[in-house]
Image: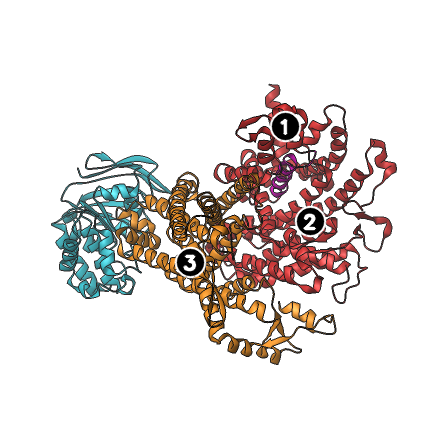
Chain colours: A red, B cyan, C orange
Amino acid sequence: MVEAEEGTDVAKAGEDRDDGLLSRYFRYHRVHLAVIAAFLVYPFIYSFLSTAPVVGSTFDLFLPDVETMVFVVVIGLFAMSFDFISGYTGYLSFGHALFYGIGAYFVIMAATGLVPFLSDETPYLLLILYGALFATGAGIVVGLVSFRLTGVYFAMLTLGFAELANIFIRDWSYLGAAPEAGITHGPGFSLGVPYVDGLQVHIGRLVGDSFHSFFGLFGMTEQIAQETVSFYAIGLLVVVCYFALQRIIHSPFGKVMVAIRENEERAKAVGYNTYWYKLGAFSISAFFAGIAGALAAGYRRGASPDNSFDLFVTADALLAAIIGGFGTLAGSLYGHLFHEMLDDFLSTESHGLARYLQGIIPDSVLEAEIVGELTLQVVINGLLAGRAELYLGLVFIFFVLVVPQGLLGTIRERIGGTAAENLPDHLRRYIRGLRK
Amino acid sequence: MMLEVENIDTYYGQSHILEGVSLAVEEGESVALIGRNGVGKTTTLRSILQLTPPTEGSITFRGEDITGMETFEVAQRGVGWVPEERRMFAHLTVDENIEVSTPPEADLDAAYDLAYETFPDLEQFRDKDAGTLSGGQQQMLAIARGLVGQNDLLLIDEPSEGLAPLIVEQVSEALEALRAETTMLLVEQNFEMAMDLTDRFYLLDHGQVVESGQSDDVSADDEFIQRYLSA
Amino acid sequence: MIVELFFQSGGTLTALDVPLSSTPVTEVLTDAMDPGALARIVLDSLSKAGLYITIAVGLTLIFGLMGVLNFAHGSFAMYGAYIGGVIMVVAVTSGTGDLSRLVIFFGAAAFVLALMTVVGGAIEKKLIRPVYDRPPLFQILLTFGIVLVLDEAARIVVEWRGITPRSRWEGPFDTLPAFLSARYDVFGSTIRGIWLFEIAVGAVIVVGVYLFLTRTRYGLYIRAGSEDGEMAQALGIDIRQAFTLVFGVGTGLAAFAGVILMWDPRFGASVPLTIEALLIAFVIVIIGGLGTFKGTVVAGVLVGFIDGFTTWMLPNYDAVEFALVSAVLPGEWAIPMSSNLPEATMFLALVVVLIVRPQGLYGIEEVGGH
């Protein structure tokens, strides 16, 4: 993969020679910009289509709502941080939820005055930063010990640390009378430039800022507008994080990470102290996992052991990274988008498939017994309502067996390089081919 | 022909190791495969065993095409392997190493007798873990494993490697005795030893057979041999 | 836990509303030497050790032979618990005698063992075989995918039958013979009959697997294949058949353990049993050293005793104080008892063993790395 990228770099250099710095920059990032634009307009498209007469409910069935999109970008960032260490160096960080959980708990604890020496008035953006730094510290400690091991022993040791933290947090009476249930911060958070009120927006489920005058144009309800504001604010930070991670991957440091994955002995033989490179990559990864946790907790206005330190939180990142493309960074976002769309599609709520089918199929058919007491109603409820995990597992197995490169990895293989660099030219050639 | 290797190409990952190797071994013959380090001698043996299956060409054993078979199927047809670095089952005892190499239908006591009569030195260590044996003893056990397997053809890889000269002498004698009993394809760095133990030889360079002939007819001084064997 | 104490006992930060009454660790150890306490600890620990080894032994054999860390192992135990439970609940009525119940139980266990051995073998052949030549990561991922599917499928069926998947299924407890559900008094401590049953079954499994590995030709093949699969194949051993067999039997044994767990009030059949069983099995095989039977047995007993001892401590103390720690650090230091203590101690043992001895107690250095 690296070789292919380097090859196209040379080809690109010739093409871009005459352009100015800025236009070259935009040319390089045009795919990124297209993706960002798609995410930007999505809330409007969703609102328009899902409220349209007649076909609205069908669109609502297939399209994830904006609140879901908030989690797509947040968990997507977490999955990217997981991919950063596991996909690029080959070390499976099975306890990655530890860093996500630290970020999540830190902001809520700080906002409720539970962190010593830190005012509960501290701006959210700073809390995110501090939380991420705490996660980095934990990453360094766990990494110092764990990188003495390799393979499954490494995976199990990181899992061991995360499980210890998980058990501890469920028990930590300092957090209140029922630590098992987690902690909350009702008022929510304002994301934006610290100490400048005009440049901050209030985010969060049900309590976020909304802007009637502007969004009212599109005839949206207030609820959606709140979610949309949160989606943009959080999305902006995720974009910044993505570019930071992407820069590191393309730097000489990132090249060493890939060298470690491909053949660690050779990387050592060439003279790299792989231990410190791995530790560095792990702490960077922990930092961004911490940011993702802090964002998720901020939007939820709370954190609980089940949605932060749990093994299944790591599993979400794993699923996203594999389906999206292991070792592709951006793939994790699409992998998790797929996950959330499936969740949303098979949801038990009104926009889910089960309720949709119950709406359009006559009761007489639903209630009719197929075999014994088994009715179509029971089958729909049993196999479709809230059963995304089942199908996700099947899709996951399919990807591992048949599409091990994942979505983005397969695209890269087809077009011979990263999508950011090669997709526009590839599309142009393809369209030209169609015209002939 | 007992073994016929025809024009095989073998890759190890991305690297092309064998490029059209052909060789043949007749029943009762002892054949040497010589050449510098890294020219593909071990890979040739691994290809015959289908451990590293060739991508092109064919391998027939006793008239049967064995290309693409599972390794254990090739072994069950009577091809034995005495690998480089011995590959003992270090945590099994010497007896167990013999037992695991004996075909299930064969008489186990006869196998023990054969092994310990051929290598009397091993008998005292029967209940010791094979990993505790010395290098020379391990080499003898490795050959004994090939012996009790009731094989028609033995592929022997670098039997003298890493052994003291005195031990090499012993191993050499054991192989000389074996030569009368079975067919051998021998990979050996020690040129003199290889020629002493075989009837014919193939010289391999860069994944190709560059010369073959009668072992008696060549000496280490030959200009041709010199060119391909000296570093 | 230490941080917890930092906040609880530091005084300068947060004072506890109700101060814990802490007991010095030396006193705890003295209390444990009381015959009643000791009997309880030993029997509880050994019964858990028997169960844990039965779960973990398949995992370690599978890893040893084929290098696959099987994440689906816990799911198989969960399936064993539910399938066994269904058989018991259907076959046993209130009028069934104790001996008949035991016979039905062994019938159910044998059926589950056989069924899940076949299922495991099929999973190995159809799903795992294609990924052997890929990096070890893919085997972890694949078996993890199997967990997602198996657990959700179990949830669908269990919910459909009106049973709550999250909490343990009480139904099968009524099928216990009186002499196993009874509590017995030993030196003033209460012992459950099923503990002794589990100790016996665990011992049979350990001895049985040991004899299979050391006294049979096939066991020899498995040990040889675990050391060097390529060499074993070159000696004519059909290693792929051995893979299928070991994966199948390992799966069957995990499910067999599940059938016992279904009867044990400390566990019971539930979908979260998947993770509980999997984590315990992981901890044991990693502490013991991946792929070694001896290590698994030793680590199983160790973890059983960690579990048994901490479980005994829970109701008896508020907090346990470590004089050594308090002597070095300022303030009073004690570990408060919580229901999560056994699990926490287990993972602490895992972390400590891996730090001190990365390949586990009896592991071989090269195994389990890259």
Work out whether mark 1 precedes mark 2 in sequence or the reverse, and give the earlier one: 2
Q: Amino acid at mark 1?
A: Arg
Q: Range of the magenta residues?
A: A330-351
Q: Are the residues under badges 1 and 2 in a single subunit?
A: yes
Position in image of residue B87 (x %, y %): 29, 55
| Mark 2 surroundings: few (<14), some (14-19) or many (≥20) residues within 10 A | some
Residue C14 versus residue B34 in the image, above or below: below
Instruction: State which quarter of the image contains the N terminus of chain B.
Output: top left
With B74 as the anchor, is A309 left or right in this view?
A: right
Residue C53, labelled with which disc? 3
Task: Find the distance from the CA under tag 1 to the CA under tag 3.
Answer: 61 Å
Residue A428, labelled with which disc? 1
Residue situated in front as seen by the camera: C26 or C136: C26
Query: Tag 3, which secondary structure?
Result: helix
| Mark 1 surroundings: few (<14), some (14-19) or many (≥20) residues within 10 A | few
Q: Which residue is mark 2?
A: A241
Position in image of residue B30 (x %, y %): 16, 47
Residue situated in front as seen by the camera: C308 or A133: C308
Task: Find the distance from the CA under tag 3 to the CA under tag 2.
Answer: 45 Å
Q: Amino acid at mark 3?
A: Ile
Residue B28 versus residue A416 in the image, above or below: below
Query: Tag 1, which secondary structure?
Result: helix
Quarter of the image holding residue C359? bottom left
Q: Are the residues under badges 3 and 2 in a single subunit?
A: no
Which residue is pictured at 66% across the width and 67% down the height?
C4
Q: Looking at the image, can residue C360 be seen?
A: no
Q: Amino acid at mark 2?
A: Cys
